[in-house]
Amino acid sequence: MDTIYSEMMSFIDTKEDWMRERRRDFHKFAEAGWHEVRTCSIIADHLIRLGVDKVLMGKECFKADARMGLPDQEELDRVYQRALEQGAVMPYAEKFKDGFTAVIGVIETGRPGPVIGFRQDIDALGVFEDKKPGHKPWEGGYASVNDGEMHACGHDGHATVGMTVAETLMKFKDRLCGTVKIVFQPAEEGVRGARGIAESGILDDVDYMIGIHMYDRNTEEDYSEGVHANEEARKLGKPQIGLCYARNMANAKLDVYFYGKAAHAAHQQKGNNAFLAALTASQAIYAIPRTSLGDSRINIGQIEAGSGRNVVCDRVKMVMELRGFTQPALEYNEAYTRRIIEHAAAMHGCTFEIKNMGATAAVMLDTPEFVDELAAMAREKLGLIVAGPAPGSNSEDYSFMAQRVEEHGGKTCFFHCLTDFPDVFHSTGFDIDETDLLSGAKFFCGAALHLMGL
Ligand SMILES: [Zn+2]
Ligand SMILES: [Zn+2]
């Protein structure tokens, strides 16, 4: 291994205890999307202490009106006060008021070289964390103290990795070239936070963009065609990094309304039952025949119906989404779904309405040859065990950043930092093993060296 690579990797190894403590603190004071005032203030304080050349905070990171799904002002005020009570660092905390919870650290070496962007998301989820024996954070006293907000997706780990990467690059800055922008992004859950940052233009000079997510090294569903690649990695030990050529699934979010006619339950023939129309439609939608146009997903997540026990149901709202790995697969399922809704309504003498609530196109999240290049780098220069690259998918608002960077010819790679999950993503018993965060920091830093031509 070349000297600077091995020196950097050894330095990262010394950060293991610090990373564990840092992640556990973020875990304990979990902040959901647009609440991340405390988290951001700690990150900003860290970057400033390191002497990072530019630390962009709050409004400096966003195109304000491109932020999506903000809580109301009352909630924003409440979580700001809470952040102060929970040790948010002043004076920085003020910068993150009112849903401007992002930090970007820009390391400028002053020497010619590439502009590299690293992205980590920092938000928690609306999940009530387990408070019972067997759940390590609870046993260790660092389960979330903010009820109904929990790091159940590992973004506390991502934030920690980003802070470690900043420290490592600053330590070796005299020997580096180009510019590195380390983006700490809020509100990934619900895909609300990335767009405001992407549209700020801050990434428009980025040549290479890399994003991270924790992933379970024991599941392979997203590496469906890559099981073989994972098996290969396993022969070497525990896979540490997972790579795929990920595509963001095309996506259609629909709110469907069925309207019938209310009547007394004893005289059902006088009414039209909207609930039956919705049930008929649900069963049929889930039974849409498979297509060779591409893999797809369907979910009806919520149904609100009816007004009382003895009243024929006259109104149903059905909240659903469709996803396709290809645009034609999505279009096939969406057209089929619309036909089913129309005819299910007609069967029961009802009318219907379909509202489009959101959509994204199928875009590549990764530049395949760039992913191959980084896989080889991680194996050869860092000695990491890499699963893949394999075809895969991600549903991530990182796609807004990837798209923005690809639009001007930049290359992007989204990698998985592998660990062992005791429970699935977004569950009340979710956890990660902090030791595995080291691989994430190593991959980012190794990629920086490689892209700087070192
Ligand atoms: Zn998540
Ligand atoms: Zn996540």
Image: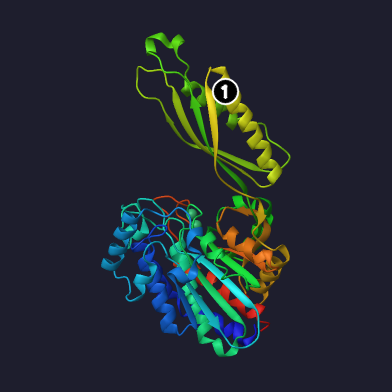
* Figure disc tally: 1
Q: Which quadrant of the structure image shows residue 43?
A: bottom left
The residue sitting at the left extreme is: 85
Tell me, yes or no, if residue 85 can be seen here.
Answer: yes
Q: Position of residue 237 (x, y in %)?
A: 59, 65
In this image, 383 relative to 16: left or right?
right
In this rendering, is residue 275 above or below 54? above
In this rendering, is residue 224 above or below 319? below
In this image, 260 relative to 127: left or right?
right
Residue at x 47%, y 51% (from the top left corner):
424
How packed mark 1 is, by other alpha carbons closer than 10 Å (few <14, some 14-19, many 20 or more), is: many
Of the pair 202 and 244, the residue shown nearer to us: 202
In the rendered structure, which amino acid carries the disc numbered 1? Ala
Q: Position of residue 343 (x, y in %)?
A: 60, 23
Image quadrant in which the C terminus is located: bottom right
In this image, 254 relative to 250: left or right?
left
Q: Position of residue 230 (x, y in %)?
A: 64, 58
The residue sitting at the front extreme is: 65
Tell me, yes or no, if residue 10 can be seen here.
Answer: no
- According to the picture, the residue beneath numbered tag 1 turns out to be 344
Coloring scheme of the render? rainbow
Residue at x 65%, y 81% (from the top left corner):
452
Of the pair 448 and 381, the residue shown nearer to us: 448
Image quadrant in which the N terminus is located: bottom right
Q: Position of residue 281 (x, y in %)?
A: 56, 27
Q: Which quadrant of the structure image shows residue 141?
A: bottom left
In this rendering, is residue 168 above or below 237? below
In this image, 357 relative to 379: left or right?
left
The residue sitting at the bottom extreme is: 174
